[in-house]
Image: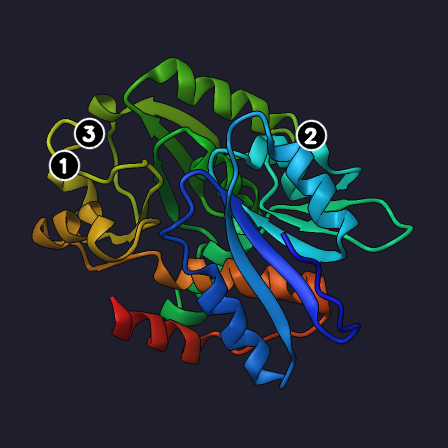
Amino acid sequence: MTAISADNIERYAVVGNPVAHSRSPQIHQAFAQQFAAQITYEKVLVEPGQFAAFVDQFAAQGGAGMNVTVPFKADAFAYADETDELATAAQAVNTLVFREGHPVLGYNTDGIGLCNDLQQRYAVEVRGINVLILGAGGAASGVLQPLLALSPNKLVVANRTLSKAQELVQHHLQFLPAGAPLACSRFEQLQGNFDLVINATSTGLSGDTVRIAPAIVEHAFCYDMSYGPAALFCRWAQQQGAAQSVDGLGMLVEQAAQSFFLWRNQRPQTEPVVKMLRASL
């Protein structure tokens, strides 16, 4: 890999496996254009077990920042010298910041991206409502704390395997004040009314992936963290009478905008980039 020699061109990358599908280079180049900034941004396929070695090389060659996607978010958390409270709670980092002579900083911008998309793009008010998250993996873990910070009436994590949901809830409760409105359930045992339903499973709702009663999403605002053709839950919820059903394209852009801000202290406009990506889907 060739280092960037020009002092005014900052170098960034997204690392994952797989990573070919990533739209991060397109997003960050669009952000940079808003500020007439010159950057390079590449996507890099890294083999399991090689994450730390690659990051060492990238930083040594003048890399300024890195986005991290599956399956390396836990590796990035272990790699960072210091992490913010959201990354610490999630035990996962999706944004690394490199500054010569300073500790490597790790952040998790996923939950901020989700909440910004819900509030700013769709005017969803989380305070006082009932929230359901489907799935108990890394995607769910990354958004729990920011959602709870918005003061819902209750937040339920549902999963096919109850023990995994219980483990996630117990882990996050240690970072929350006593009496935090966080609970868990199996998919089949879900009861009650939910105002906001968020799909954080990896494959969406298809076949046996997520077995929940259609009544759970009826009249709810439904949000699929997947986007485009992968947003199967989004389409299913719409068919079941959801009040509104949207995919996670806005979250993708919003979490990237937070990364861009952490790297460059510049807050990009996200709506033009969402529209650009939507047109390309």
**Residue located at (87% from left, 54% from top):** 100
Q: How is the image coloured?
A: rainbow
| C-beta proximity under 8 Å, tags 1 and 3 | yes
Q: Nearer the viewer, residue 229 or 83?
A: 229
Q: Position of residue 119 (x, y in %)?
A: 45, 65
The kind of secondary structure element at disc 1 is loop
Tell me: residue 57, above or below residue 120: above
The kind of secondary structure element at disc 3 is loop
Amino acid type indicated by mark 1: Ser
Front label number (1 vs 2): 2
Residue located beneath label 1 in the image: 206
Amino acid type indicated by mark 2: Ala
- Most extreme residue toward the right, as rendered? 101
**Residue located at (47% from left, 60% from top):** 24
Could you say which disc has been placed on residue 209 in the image?
3
Q: Nearer the viewer, residue 35 or 114?
A: 35
Mark pair 3, 2: CA separation? 31 Å
Q: Is residue 91 visible?
A: no
Mark pair 1, 2: CA separation? 34 Å
Amino acid type indicated by mark 3: Thr
Residue located beneath label 2 in the image: 78
* Rendered image quadrant of residue 57: top right
